[in-house]
Image (cartoon, rainbow, N blue to C red):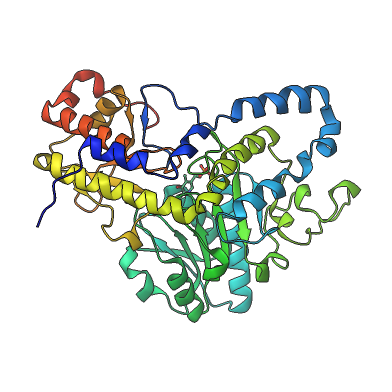
């Protein structure tokens, strides 16, 4: 039995009944833009410009150096970290905001390798997924070389079977940036622990996108990104978490003064701070962290409405809708979803693989010209690594009518072959 695809009016009715709909007012969305790329760069919280202005004009301009104390700059990494902790199943004091995702991965992967090999020196393998995000693989390659370890890359379905006593650290991104496929954090962590391995989870496409329970899963280390689903602004600082059983006794390798037990005694010798503060390195990026706080607050505003569980339910309804609409209205063009159909395995995005005769880059450019902003992720064009049209869903502001409208534009771009126009062929530096 097939059911007729929802009409735009049906979608408008879903929006009218959506208890999360008022959360959209927290954002400044440019007119005429249907933004489905919050998985790459979240939209701007309406509070961000005034906050940036106040930090620059009053806190910096007038407060000057006094603001480290009077405006609380020095505790920003912990204050914003405590807010992020509420979104990822961590306790107060367990998350700090610092540096970039790449740099934080370097810290925790190094700490995890040191810890695992202290307990069992013979373990040499960092196990990860072949289609993990490149920066994660590059950082792991560098650390493997420095620690005399090796990076083993496998397909997602091979992870469980390749976990054995050779493995020091299982390093995974919970939601795959290309496909939107989601790992079972609790199950894989338990499996890793059963063979004596530690886990490092990258939450770049999880934090603020899906409910995460780091302590519930018993994970060892985690990092995540500030500028995607946390809406922290371009280049926003990232965050880092370590389980309480590790936080206090593992030194991370970037032993900067902000991670010192007492930065302002200016000791000659490094002594790590007691808890997660040791995962800081240098001076916090005050403007960036202040704006990130505005973004994190947009997610915490959902707490009285059911929080991440309610956002998750809407996210799945949005991705189900796009899958059904594409199947019903774009079928003739051979687009194929590479995003898992099962909810338990899906993050908060949908990726559509392009058949060889479609130039996915040009299709996305044609969509963007009409205000539908997703992004394009190149593969090698083979069935295993196809070129992808990627659409992210951020239930804080994405509406059901937005999804319907996006598929209307997609169908029209494909039906009219509008994407073949020469102006869509030019590749910019950032896709
Ligand atoms: C976005 C993303 C990053 C980003 O790292 P930066 O250091 O902020 O450039 C890292 N890892 C994954 C899995 C990502 O999706």
Q: Position of residue 117 (x, y in %)?
A: 59, 73
Q: Residue at x 84, y 36 (%)?
A: 70
Residue 392 image-quadrant placement:
top left
**Drawn side of residue 302 relative to residue 359, left or right:** right
**Drawn side of residue 290 relative to residue 394, left or right:** right
What quarter of the picture does the N terminus occupy?
bottom left
Q: Where 266 sits versus 66, above or below?
A: below
What quarter of the picture does the C terminus occupy?
top left
Residue in front for this viewpoint, 169 or 363: 363
**Drawn side of residue 292 relative to residue 324, left or right:** right
Q: Where 139 sits versus 190, above or below?
A: above
Q: Position of residue 267 (x, y in %)?
A: 89, 51
Q: Residue at x 52, y 69 (%)?
A: 217
Q: Position of residue 84 (x, y in %)?
A: 60, 51
Q: Where 213 sits versus 77, above or below?
A: below
Q: Residue at x 32, y 40 (%)?
A: 400
């Amino acid at each position: 039995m097939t059911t007729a695809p929802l009409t735009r009016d049906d979608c408008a009715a879903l929006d009218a009944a959506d208890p999360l709909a008022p959360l959209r007012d927290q954002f400044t969305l440019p007119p005429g833009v249907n933004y489905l790329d919050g998985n790459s760069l979240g939209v701007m919280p309406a509070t961000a410009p005034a906050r940036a202005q106040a930090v620059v004009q009053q806190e910096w301009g007038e407060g000057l150096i006094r603001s480290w104390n009077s405006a609380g700059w020095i505790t920003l990494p912990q204050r914003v970290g405590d807010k992020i902790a509420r979104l990822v199943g961590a306790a107060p004091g367990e998350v700090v905001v610092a540096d970039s995702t790449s740099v934080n991965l370097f810290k925790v992967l190094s700490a995890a390798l040191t810890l695992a090999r202290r307990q069992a020196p013979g373990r040499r393998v960092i196990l990860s997924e072949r289609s993990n995000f490149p920066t994660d693989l590059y950082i792991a390659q560098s650390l493997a070389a420095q620690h005399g370890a090796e990076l083993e890359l496998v397909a997602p379905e091979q992870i469980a079977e390749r976990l054995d006593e050779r493995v020091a650290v299982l390093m995974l991104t919970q939601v795959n940036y290309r496909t939107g496929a989601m790992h079972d954090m609790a199950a894989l962590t338990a499996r890793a622990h059963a063979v004596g391995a530690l886990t490092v989870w990258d939450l770049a496409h999880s934090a603020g996108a899906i409910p995460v329970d780091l302590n519930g899963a018993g994970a060892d280390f985690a990092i995540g990104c500030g500028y995607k689903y946390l809406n922290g602004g371009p280049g926003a600082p990232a965050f880092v978490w370590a389980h309480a059983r590790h936080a206090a006794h593992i030194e991370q390798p970037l032993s900067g003064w902000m991670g010192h037990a007492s930065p302002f005694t200016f000791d000659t010798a490094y002594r790590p701070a007691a808890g997660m503060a040791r995962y800081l390195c240098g001076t916090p990026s005050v403007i960036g962290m202040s704006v990130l706080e505005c973004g994190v607050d947009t997610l915490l505003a959902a707490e009285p409405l059911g929080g991440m569980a309610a956002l998750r339910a809407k996210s799945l309804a949005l991705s189900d809708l796009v899958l059904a609409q594409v199947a019903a209205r774009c079928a003739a063009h051979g687009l194929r979803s590479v995003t898992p159909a099962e909810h338990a395995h899906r993050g908060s995005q949908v990726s559509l693989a392009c058949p060889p005769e479609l130039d996915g880059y040009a299709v996305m450019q044609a969509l963007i010209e009409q205000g539908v902003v997703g992004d394009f992720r190149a593969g090698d064009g083979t069935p295993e690594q196809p070129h992808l049209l990627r659409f992210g869903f951020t239930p804080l502001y994405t509406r059901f009518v937005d999804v319907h409208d996006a598929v209307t534009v997609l169908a029209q771009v494909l039906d009219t072959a509008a994407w073949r126009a020469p102006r869509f062929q030019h590749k910019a530096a950032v896709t």
